[in-house]
Image (tube, rainbow, N blue to C red):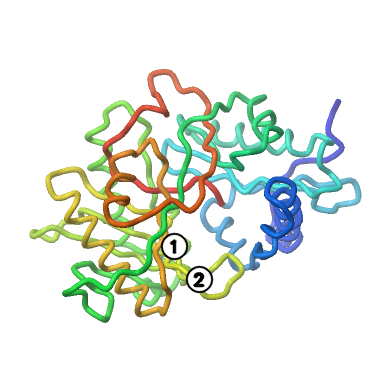
Amino acid sequence: MAPAVTVRPLRPSDLEPARWVIYRAYVEAIVQLYGRDSATGYEVRSTSFMDLYLRRDPAGCFVAEAPGGAVAGAVFCFVWGEVGWFGSLAVAPEWQGRGAGQALTQQAVTYLGGRGCRRVGLETWPHSPLVRHLYGKYGFLPVRPTVKFSRPVAGRAGVEGDGTAGVTWITCQDVPGQGGAGAALEAVHAVTAAQARTCPGEPVVDYRAEVAAPLETGWADLAIAGDRAGDPVGYALCYRKRPGGGPAAALDVRLLGVAPGRAVASTLDRLLEGCDARARQAGVASLTVDVNLRHAYAAGLLRARDFRPVYELLRMERHLPGFDARARSAVVDCARWAG
């Protein structure tokens, strides 16, 4: 049976109703899965945070429009080179079970395939059989989970109070206007290119658009670690605000990568020390980092540095011949596929 909604590209004017659809859908899901008390801390996303979706991939945002024009659901797609994922996907409670979720999922799969994404996935609630069933219809299979790790901010000897600590910090003041982050984005790309050279045949990731939008709008700061020659060997993209727009309770490291080589552990230490100093400067008490457990080496390094798991998300991916999403990887590439 054809869905009662029409899927179309999202317009800027849809951001306001879409953020309330996401809030209502996610609160209901949290209540059903974890109880009413667990939903009390969930906040509606700010319009400026929603605008980041459009900045990161304007053509990859879609809504399900109900008869009469109301927004019944929304999905947001992200293209990272040959890697693509979608989320958040949300359907208003009164429209759930009527085909809107399937229509949005199909649109996301079609869009990411058309953009040349070889590896396609998402992250979702780990304990929802209905969600697994929906995505399973489109060929998505569970792989290794993604874990949010957290630790209290450390007060390490030799960390400078201004938050440098052996890294260079890039903020929105360093990238005036809308011209992009320039050298900072190329530094991130240099690290991911070095990682790709150690993993021939794997889908190649490109985080530049993912970094540019929050950096240019002041949602996040970027730390770059260089080697003795000044070449970039690591980066950390740190969000300073909650999705609701207020100051974050933790410095949330949304992306973190280290170039392969002998200095992986020491580069990671420099990045984390810089994040500690930055967090102290901002008056927050903890750091958080998201790691898919395919990157077991990265998870082990974080555990050895006193990070502990807070919660996990279920990652699901479509099968890609010649690529095993469950195989362990020694590349330090920490990222979350959830909006």
Q: Residue furthest left?
A: 228
Residue 266, picture quadrant: bottom left
Marks 1/2: CA–CA distance? 8 Å
Residue 244, picture quadrant: bottom right
- Position above or below: 210 against 181: above
Badge 1 marks a residue whose secondary structure is strand
Q: Are marks 1 and 2 in contact (CB under 8 Å)?
A: yes
Q: Circle 2 sits on which residue?
A: 248
**Residue 217 x %, y %:** 48, 70
Is residue 211 among what the camera can see?
A: no
**Residue 281 x %, y %:** 35, 80
Q: Residues within 10 Å of mark 2 (few under 14, many from 20)?
A: some
Residue at image point 72% right, 57% down: 18
Pick the residue in front: 82 or 45: 45
Q: Disc count in the image? A: 2
- Could you tell me the amino acid type at mark 1? Asp
Side (left or right) of 67 relative to 298? right
- Position above or below: 9 against 240: above
- Could you tell me the amino acid type at mark 2? Ala
Q: Residue furthest right?
A: 68
Q: Which mark is residue 252?
A: 1
- Position above or below: 91 against 289: above
Badge 2 marks a residue whose secondary structure is strand
Is residue 167 among what the camera can see?
A: yes
Pick the residue in front: 151 or 208: 151
**Residue 223 x %, y %:** 30, 64
**Residue 82 x %, y %:** 42, 36
Q: Residues within 10 Å of mark 1 (few under 14, many from 20)?
A: many
Residue at image point 86% right, 47% down: 94
Side (left or right) of 338 relative to 138? left
